[in-house]
Amino acid sequence: MSVPVRVRNLEKTFGRYPALKGVSLDVEAGELVALLGPSGSGKTTLLRAIAGLEQPEAGQVLFGGIDAGSLSLRERRIGFVFQQYALFRHMKVFDNIAFGLRARPRASRPPEAAIKARVLELLHLVQLDGLEARYPAQLSGGQRQRVALARALAIEPRVLLLDEPFGALDARVRKDLRKWLRGLHQRTGHTTLFVTHDQDEAFELADRIAILDHGRIEQVGTAAEILGHPATPFIDSFIEGIARREARAREWTKPHAVAGR
Amino acid sequence: MAMSDRVLPLAHTPERATTETAATKAVLIGIAVLFLAAILFLPLVTVFMEALRKGWGTLFESFGDPDTLAAIRLTLLVAAIAVPFNAVVGLAASWAIAKFEFRGKNLLLTLIDLPFSISPVISGLVYVLLFGAHGWLGPWLQHYNIQIIFAVPGIVLATVLVTFPFVARELIPLMQSQGTSEEETALTLGASGWHTFFRVTLPNVKWALLYGVLLCNARAMGEFGAVSVVSGHIRGLTNTMPLHIEILYNEYNFVGAFAVASLLAGLALLTLLAKSFLEWRFAGELAAAARRH
């Protein structure tokens, strides 16, 4: 149940400050795409506009063939994970994950037994078996992040949107979760967009990377494409650190090969 | 570490920057306790002692007075109207201010604080100017035979005005610090606006709301200034407990005055007890709610 996402010429301003200046982006069904850029580049605004949390002044978002502008937030069925997870702090883990299912109108709401089965299945998927009776305050950062993910997956979202998914975690947990998220994506196959300002994270995790600056997408491509042919001087300087590290890694592993770039 | 500090005499002791000497502590705590005893505790004890000076029988006799009973009833009635009203409107105002961006937000915030900054007497006078016989709306009200000033509606209005900030002031900072991401999450998960409000927003502020309501109630029952201006002091009709206390006192009926005063103080103490009980009973939940991610 994953659909391609098409973004067409999105424009959004906050007061006089333009956050998105005609952004277009195609994401294929089941693809994992990173929105990478410095702070203030518009990456989070783009993510929120796709989710329907921001109303763009112009442009279109399409899920498959459907214009998202014609859908209510409920009809969009977006799995959105906030940077600080935004877990419902007064609810136990179980009730957090069950929220989306219980919030459905009576006619389409699954029976409580089915909700329970689904929640336990999701807890197993995010490897938090047995923690359903905890409150969010009793969990570690990495555990909270996975609860937020399970809660988003519970509504069988069309698209999964993650805002700085590892931003609030320490470096070691971050590395583990990155690998784990990649594996989860391979198993569930949701079309996924995630926002990050961390180049390594984007290049290691994503199928393709969209680099934003000042409300525009400067380049979209695979890691190899971007590293091989940086489209603008901004990108060249933005990815410099990674390019250097990649080159060094290549020299280490293949000492006689020419470090090509 | 505290032990080794005491062992080293006059040497450079590695005390924490926040630690004071025992003498300083004793003096500071002593001042605070003395102050509280003189300013708060002693007067409260005096109220109850004066009320009981001629024994329990006289105390209960003064409660049997029809005018006193009427004053108690009126006070409870006014609180029963003003407190729920301020709870609902205060919640709505806090919600709007904390969760949405709109023009005139700062003006609204200032208006909410206004009853705290102006004298209650002025709050009362405003209503006399508006609804009194010679006020702006006076002739119109008289034409339809609606009595607001020197009647119960005026007392309720004055109480609502004076006690409005309690709930809103308690809720706004909390709601602002909690932000909107939980609500946004609920909406993306498919919840309706009302579902989001009752399942996410309201549970997150329920303790602050309760505190606000309790404080609002204490003040609503005790308000004197504004109510005094609009009430007209008609015995058995428009006298609330605080006004009735003053009348009895001015008539040298000290036992009667202090009897009603002790009841009013008792109601206030009950409010505080309820607050403390809730804090104790739900300490764990409160701590969990206060902790941020």
Image: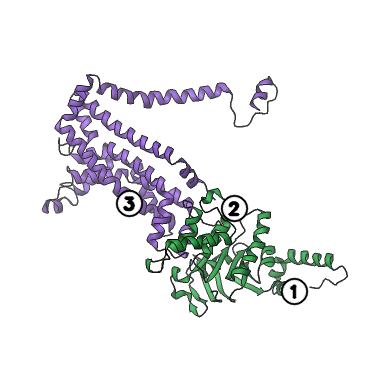
Using the image, determine if residue B91 lies above or below residue B227: below
Image side of residue A218 versus residue B224, left or right: right
Q: Camera-side residue: A21 or A182?
A: A182
Residue A173: image location, x then y, percent: 66, 55
Compare marks 2 and 1 and give the one earlier in the sequence: 2
Number of the label disc, if any, that sits on residue A141: 2
What's the amino acid at mark 3? Val
Q: Chain of mark 1?
A: A
Count neighbours of disc 1 (C-alpha within 10 A) and say few if under 14, some if 14 to 19, many if 20 or more. few
Q: Residue furthest bottom?
A: A65
- SS class, disc 1: helix
- Chain painted in purple in the figure: B
Mark 2 or 1, closer to the camera: 2
Residue B216: image location, x then y, percent: 33, 42
| Quarter where residue B223 is shown | top left
Residues tagged by mark 2 and mark 1 found on one chain of the structure: yes
**Where does the C terminus of chain A fall, quadrant-wise?**
bottom right
Give how far apart the Cα atoms at labels 3 and 1 are: 61 Å
Q: Which residue is mark 3?
A: B88
What's the amino acid at mark 2? Gly
Residue B167: image location, x then y, percent: 36, 46
Q: Residue furthest right?
A: A256
Mark 3 or 2, closer to the camera: 2
Residues tagged by mark 3 and mark 2 found on one chain of the structure: no
The residue at the point 37 percent across, 66 percent down is A106
Number of the label disc, if any, that sits on residue A228: 1
Give how far apart the Cα atoms at labels 2 and 1 are: 36 Å
Q: Camera-side residue: B221 or A19?
A: B221
| Quarter where residue B64 is shown | top left
